[in-house]
Image (tube, rainbow, N blue to C red):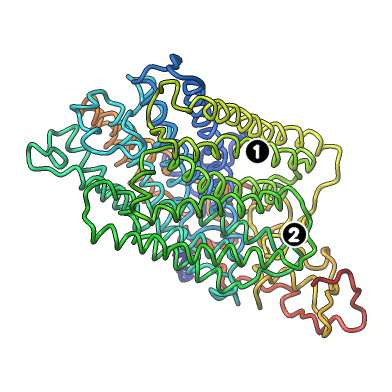
């Protein structure tokens, strides 16, 4: 957490010549002339969030191309586009890429960018660790993808069940790349989770207790706790697999006393909480967007928060419904059937709360609103199909059929990704300073909705007809031909909708040059991140706001009269921040996070090919650790590499004094002060 060091540890006052002495390789980076270098060494949580999102889109394109190859192969019976071996690699890498390198990092992108803004902080608690977590994620993802260059990808499914993941059935190195790449990405998730938890618990602005936090921040907090406890379980299983494959251990070798079900249990103890840590950030984002475009507060704030917490706890008790056909016994089957039913309750609470938020509101069907409603409807379908798996006899028939593929995608794409798409449109002006084109955005939604349902709705039928998942071809005459063609057409429509979104980014950027800037609050939003300029300045807030209630920013603009009519009490110009950040101290950039992160793939390559590379990677990591520990607290010029000079000399532990660094002139304003001058602008409900 952030600490404020006592004054004796401050650097000497004066003209700065004594404060910043050359330290050679231990010096912090100064602001370089090349703009791209500022991104390499940044510790700014906003830039790190943008890089998470950019990397996730890059991996999404890769995973999407793999999905199109799968659908093209299954267009007709006895397809010959891919061999059985290549098909196994493609569907394994598709699932792995989408789960670990797309959905999870998109959630991390929004968490990194938005969460400090929503709690009124200037950065996260540990900025260098934040940078390290991103570069670890990117290093792990790139390492995983390089398996295509060195013999082919993993071929055991994204879950890599033993004994198929052993050297007997997968003698190549694809599984090793999968295993070690996800271990590196797991380091990123674990360090990021600790950082964000400490940030939420310690850096909230004055007046913001836990139940004045926005719902997205709450869902982010629950997600980070899930990561904190789930990632070590997966990492433990992966280390066992690494020893089995690279050092001839026998944890999963039945002939030597091992147990393949050990992997299955460990993987799904991680895997089912993982489903919720992927969907909860999207739930939080939708809970931010719906009130804005319904023009009313979220219905049942405390119920949504507590249901999210309940999902976090109950998610640990349902993993074995993935194992009903594994011979776990009737008592276990009965127990996990019941827990699978029960976990639908807190999820249903959220859906009811969202529906009640829409009821009676003045709805504005913008692009973010459409995608939010898309999440509610598509996730409801996925949730209902998921509850059918609590009925063990039905699950036994559905298991390993395309019914499961349909359910999984309705939850994660129809749920998480629709929510993320809405959030892209919603927060784009806050991040980049221009709005995405609304007409293209609405068209984007309808095309994506059409393509999504054409792709995955027929898979319910295919599964109930008996088509197995994870097969590279099928025979004609079983009724699979027509629906597979529909799925393939839908997949290409879905891909076109993603291309529309990418086109919208560049088209809107060009058009924005001839349009007025959107301002800090283009949507008339409710939470305090919208009081900052757009795009958000490097210092976030100056001064740090003081929060007196939930939806603080909204109630600085509006008040309710006694007859429940909404009146405007202050203009946006009066409540938005306009400071230039003069004198705000920010953490300085650092070389060492990226160096430390990319030493890990060197070690991983060494484990696969030669231990000499492990020695090289270990030396690089050791140098990075010592450099990290010994570098000075500040760079010449201060800030995140910008021109904001330090007005104090607290290091990384003291750069985020968000608790008492100022007060906002509108902090004490309430609706009662508006008096007779208040102008009525809208009536809701």
Q: Looking at the image, which residue is at 60% across and 38% down? A: 452
**Does the image show residue 600?**
yes
66 and 629: which is toward the camera: 66
Residue 136 left/right relative to 579: left
Residue 242 spot, x, y in % from top left: 22, 37
As drawn, the residue found furthest toward the front would be 477
Residue 455 spot, x, y in % from top left: 56, 34
Q: Name above or below for residue 264 compared with residue 175.
A: below
Residue 400 spot, x, y in % from top left: 36, 39
Q: Which mark is residue 448?
A: 1
* SS under mark 1: helix
What residue sits right under mark 2 in the picture? 293
Quadrant hosting residue 82: top left
Lower position in the chain sequence, tag 1 or tag 2: 2
Classify 10 Å Cα crowding around label 1: few (below 14), some (14-19), many (20 and above). Answer: many
Residue 248 left/right relative to 105: left
Which quadrant of the figure contains the C terminus? bottom right
Residue 268 left/right relative to 93: left
Q: Looking at the image, which residue is at 40% across and 52% down? A: 389
**Does the image show residue 535?**
no
Q: Name above or below for residue 174 compared with residue 368.
A: above
248 and 158: which is toward the camera: 158
As drawn, the residue found furthest toward the left would be 256
Q: Name above or below for residue 378 compared with residue 287.
A: above
Q: Could you give the CA–CA distance between mark 1 and mark 2, rounded to whole angstroms? A: 21 Å
Q: Looking at the image, which residue is at 20% across and 48% down? A: 262
Quadrant hosting residue 214: bottom right
């Amino acid at each position: 957490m952030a600490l404020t060091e006592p004054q004796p540890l401050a650097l000497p006052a004066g003209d700065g010549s004594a404060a910043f002495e050359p330290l050679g390789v231990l010096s912090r980076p100064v602001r370089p002339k090349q703009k791209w270098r500022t991104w390499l060494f940044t510790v700014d949580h906003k830039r790190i969030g943008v890089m998470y999102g950019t990397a996730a889109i890059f991996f999404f394109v890769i995973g999407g191309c793999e999905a199109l190859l799968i659908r093209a192969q299954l267009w007709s019976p006895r397809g010959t586009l891919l061999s059985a071996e290549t098909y196994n690699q493609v569907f394994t890498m598709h699932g792995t890429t989408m789960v670990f390198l797309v959905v999870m990092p998109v959630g991390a992108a929004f968490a990194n960018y938005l969460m400090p803004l929503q709690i009124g902080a200037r950065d996260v608690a540990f900025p260098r660790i934040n940078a390290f977590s991103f570069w670890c994620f990117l290093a792990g993802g790139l390492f995983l993808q390089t398996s295509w260059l060195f013999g082919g990808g993993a071929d055991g499914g994204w879950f890599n069940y033993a004994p198929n993941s052993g050297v007997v059935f997968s003698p190549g190195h694809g599984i090793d790349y999968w295993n070690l790449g996800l271990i590196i990405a797991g380091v990123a998730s674990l360090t990021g989770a600790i950082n964000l938890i400490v940030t939420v618990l310690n850096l909230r602005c004055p007046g913001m207790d836990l139940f004045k936090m926005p719902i997205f921040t709450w869902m982010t907090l629950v997600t980070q706790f899930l990561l904190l406890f789930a990632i070590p379980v997966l990492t433990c299983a992966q280390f066992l697999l690494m020893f089995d494959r690279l050092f001839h251990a026998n944890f999963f070798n039945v002939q030597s006393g091992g147990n393949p079900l050990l992997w299955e249990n460990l993987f799904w103890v991680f895997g089912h909480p993982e489903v919720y840590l992927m969907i909860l950030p999207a739930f939080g984002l939708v809970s931010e967007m719906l009130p804005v475009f319904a023009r009313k507060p979220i219905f049942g704030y405390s119920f949504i928060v507590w249901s999210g917490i309940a999902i976090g706890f109950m998610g640990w008790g349902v993993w074995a419904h993935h194992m009903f056909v594994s011979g776990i016994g009737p008592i276990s089957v009965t127990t996990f059937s019941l827990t699978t039913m029960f976990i639908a309750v807190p999820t249903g609470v959220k859906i009811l709360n969202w529906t009640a938020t829409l009821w009676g509101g003045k709805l504005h069907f913008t692009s973010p609103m459409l995608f939010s409603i898309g999440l509610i409807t598509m996730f409801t379908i996925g949730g209902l199909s998921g509850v059918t798996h609590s009925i063990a006899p039905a699950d036994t028939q559905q298991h390993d059929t395309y019914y499961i593929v349909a359910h999984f995608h309705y939850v994660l794409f129809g749920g998480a990704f629709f929510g993320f798409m809405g959030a892209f449109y919603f927060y784009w002006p806050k991040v980049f300073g221009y709005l995405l084109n609304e007409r293209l955005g609405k068209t984007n939604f309808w095309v994506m909705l059409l393509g999504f349902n054409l792709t995955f709705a027929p898979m319910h039928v295919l599964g109930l007809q008996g088509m197995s998942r994870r097969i590279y071809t099928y025979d004609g005459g079983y009724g699979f031909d027509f629906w597979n063609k529909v799925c393939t057409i839908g997949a290409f429509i879905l891909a076109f909708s993603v291309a529309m979104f990418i086109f919208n980014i560049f088209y809107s950027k060009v058009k924005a040059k001839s349009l007025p800037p959107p301002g800090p609050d283009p949507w008339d939003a409710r939470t305090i991140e919208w009081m900052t300029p757009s795009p958000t300045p490097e210092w976030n807030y100056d001064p740090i706001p003081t929060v007196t209630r939930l939806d603080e920013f909204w109630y600085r603009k509006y008040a309710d009269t006694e007859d429940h009519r909404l009146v405007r009490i202050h203009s946006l110009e009066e409540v938005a921040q306009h400071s230039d950040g003069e004198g705000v101290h920010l953490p300085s950039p650092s070389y060492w996070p990226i160096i430390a992160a990319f030493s890990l793939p060197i070690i991983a390559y060494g484990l696969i090919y030669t231990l000499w590379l492990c020695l090289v990677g270990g030396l690089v990591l050791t140098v990075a650790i010592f450099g990290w520990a010994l570098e000075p607290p500040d760079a010449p010029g201060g800030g995140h590499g910008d021109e904001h000079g330090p007005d104090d000399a607290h290091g990384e532990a003291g750069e985020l004094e968000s608790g008492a660094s100022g007060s906002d002139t509108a902090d004490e304003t309430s609706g009662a002060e508006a008096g007779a001058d208040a102008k009525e602008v809208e009536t809701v409900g």
